Image (spheres, rainbow, N blue to C red):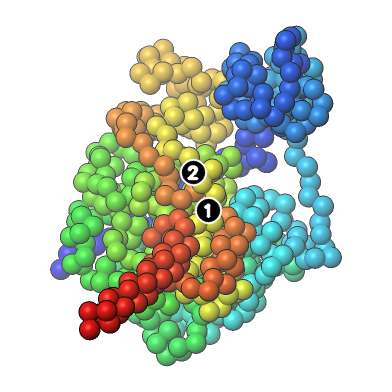
């Protein structure tokens, strides 16, 4: 019998460098421009395509920057033009130097970071010691949603992953009595997380809030059901078999879904808001052909219960979900474990009404370099350098907290959001929660997948091997033998590893240059918890609500409004028909 191997997304994570603060803010500058002669400032004069606005755009271009925003009210009141511009390649410091050389610039200053004032009286800003470092939690506007709810102990989520370590910042929110090991198919109160992946995901969903330690999840209160599939396998693996330590098979996932189905069937009142699945499977079957596979049928059956959302990570290969891979990872020497013309699952599974596929974004709203993308990706969420709980016994990067990157880190933001919405509206159906999440997403933050950056890859290779970026920034893809000799002398023992990295970079650069049909990362944009709460508030209070399966933006409203129109029309035509029949008689 053919075994289908599931390659965990966390194995394929790309290395990322930690940033202190918002990336775009490091390149943004606030400017006050003089108004040109014979021009006056007014709201109309500062329209997007006005002569005055185009003048400011041109001024920005002349210093290799882009106009981000003109503050119209300030400009109109002051008679000078207040603007925010962003450098294309330089730092804010260098951009300011160039701006101050211009006669039309009155002043320029950095877009500095302002520390939040803690609103302890409202409990909106928790006292967790590392809260300021949780850029993802802030980006999805969770603190604003916390004004309404911080979660509930009556709401459950499931994490199908590498177990959860009994962490002091998680213990209170773990449903340990419901833990399950899908590899051994036994109930398991706790499984030692020797990878750290499941512990990290759980922290983003529901690290305990306002406990004066560590981090906080999207939910301060929630019940997380840990379903492990590799914890004990790793513990039972000898050092000579390390290459197999991350192997996971489809039965384990089917076993986990079966266990969750039994929980829901045995407890009709259980509120399981969402299931987090951050793993990926590459097979040659098309999405339509995949319907014949048992794994798909298990997902379909679980989905048909209509009791929970299935939230899956889009994948970290930088490819289009729902489309065949354009190359073979091994043949091209790139990171990953997939073959040409294969598809990634579960993200590519068709016709699952309650599934949400999640892509990843960076600090500044740009696509994470590794994220998969396309029309099959529903929503994006923060996925670069996410700080969360970790396992201190993990075989790599052990510790109680750590940074991780990947769509695996983006998905739990969505799971946490679903649980938060469910805590305030416990009777909301999965379709209503899904619709609120997708409709509330910020469409302004939905970047287009971009070709691979050779310069970025060189910089990251330099950072990995502690090499000065200046030494390699000008190295072309086909660098010369002289470059080779210089690097070999400089790097010493690390030269071989560096060459492997360069080969990977070359192949990615070649491959991505062939991908001309670029699309948005997701169908909706970036997760916005506060906006989703507002959408759910509106939909739950509509007099007539014909809920949709969550197939897109405004689905709930469209179906509700359409329902009113259709019902009204039916009554009108029925009454008209009755009157016509009476007249004939």
Q: Which disc is residue 446 wearing?
A: 2
Q: Secondary structure at mark 1?
A: loop
Would residue 400 be seen by someone viewing this image from the given angle?
A: no
Q: Is residue 39 above or below residue 166?
A: above
Q: Give the residue at x 43% y 27%.
A: 454
User: Would you name the residue on which mark 1 appears?
Assistant: 441
Q: Quadrant of residue 131?
A: bottom right
168 and 316: which one is in front?
316
Q: Give the residue at x 75% y 39%.
A: 113
Q: Quadrant of residue 86?
A: top right
Badge 1 vs badge 2, beta-carbon distance below 8 Å: yes
Return the x and y of residue 472 as percentages of the image width and height: 50, 21
Return the x and y of residue 300 as percentages of the image width and height: 30, 71
469 and 354: which one is in front?
354
555 and 320: which one is in front?
555
Return the x and y of residue 373 as percentages of the image width and height: 39, 46
- Quick one: label 1, few (<14), some, or many (20+) residues within 10 Å? many
Q: Give the residue at x 50% y 84%.
A: 270
Would residue 133 be seen by someone viewing this image from the given angle?
A: yes
């Amino acid at each position: 019998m053919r075994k289908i191997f599931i390659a965990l997304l966390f194995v394929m994570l790309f290395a990322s460098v930690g940033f202190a603060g918002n990336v775009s803010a490091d390149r943004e500058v606030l400017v006050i421009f003089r108004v040109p002669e014979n021009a006056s400032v007014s709201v109309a004069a500062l329209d997007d395509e006005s002569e005055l606005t185009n003048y400011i755009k041109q001024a920005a271009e002349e210093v290799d920057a882009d106009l981000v925003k003109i503050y119209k009210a300030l400009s109109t009141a002051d008679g000078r033009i207040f603007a925010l511009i962003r450098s294309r390649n330089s730092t804010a410091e260098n951009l300011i130097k160039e701006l101050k050389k211009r006669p039309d610039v009155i002043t320029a200053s950095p877009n500095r970071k302002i520390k939040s004032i803690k609103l302890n009286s409202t409990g909106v800003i928790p006292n967790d010691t590392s809260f300021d470092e949780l850029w993802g939690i802030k980006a999805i506007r969770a603190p604003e949603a916390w004004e309404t709810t911080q979660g509930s102990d009556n709401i459950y989520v499931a994490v199908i992953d590498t177990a959860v370590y009994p962490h002091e910042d998680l213990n209170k929110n773990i449903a340990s009595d419901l833990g399950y090991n899908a590899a051994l198919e036994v109930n398991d109160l706790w499984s030692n997380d020797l990878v750290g992946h499941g512990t990290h995901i759980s922290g983003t969903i529901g690290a305990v809030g306002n406990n004066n330690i560590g981090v906080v999840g999207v939910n301060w209160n929630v019940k997380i059901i840990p379903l492990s599939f590799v914890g004990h396998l790793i513990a039972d693996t000898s050092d000579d078999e390390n290459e197999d330590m991350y192997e996971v098979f489809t039965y384990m996932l089917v076993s986990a879904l079966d266990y969750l189905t039994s929980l829901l069937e045995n407890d009709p009142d259980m509120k399981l808001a969402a299931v987090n699945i951050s793993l990926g499977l590459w097979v040659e079957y098309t999405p339509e052909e995949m319907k014949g596979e048992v794994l798909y049928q298990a997902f379909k059956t679980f989905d048909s219960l209509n009791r929970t959302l299935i939230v899956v990570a889009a994948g970290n290969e930088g490819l289009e979900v729902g489309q065949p891979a354009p190359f073979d990872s091994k043949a091209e020497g790139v990171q990953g474990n997939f073959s040409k013309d294969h598809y990634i699952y579960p993200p590519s599974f068709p016709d699952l009404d309650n599934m949400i596929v999640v892509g990843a974004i960076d600090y500044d709203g740009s696509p994470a370099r590794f994220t998969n993308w396309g029309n099959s990706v529903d929503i994006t969420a923060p996925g670069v350098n996410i700080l969360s709980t970790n396992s201190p016994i993990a075989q790599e990067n052990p510790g109680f907290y750590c940074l991780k990157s990947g769509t695996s880190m983006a998905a739990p933001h969505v799971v946490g959001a679903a649980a938060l919405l469910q805590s305030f509206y416990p009777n909301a159906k999965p379709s209503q929660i899904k619709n609120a999440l997708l409709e509330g997403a910020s469409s302004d933050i939905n970047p287009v997948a971009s070709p691979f950056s050779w310069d970025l890859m060189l910089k990251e290779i330099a950072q990995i091997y502690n090499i000065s970026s200046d030494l390699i920034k000008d190295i072309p893809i086909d660098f010369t033998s002289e470059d080779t000799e210089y690097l070999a002398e400089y790097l010493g023992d690390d030269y071989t590893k560096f060459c492997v990295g360069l080969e990977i970079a070359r192949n990615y650069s070649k491959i991505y240059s062939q991908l001309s049909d670029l699309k948005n990362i997701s169908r909706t944009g970036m997760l916005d918890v506060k906006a989703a709460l507002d959408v759910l508030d509106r939909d739950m209070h509509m007099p007539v609500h014909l809920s949709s399966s969550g197939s897109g933006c405004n689905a709930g409203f469209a179906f509700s409004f359409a329902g009113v129109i259709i019902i009204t029309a039916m009554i009108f035509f029925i009454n008209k028909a009755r009157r016509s029949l009476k007249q004939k008689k």
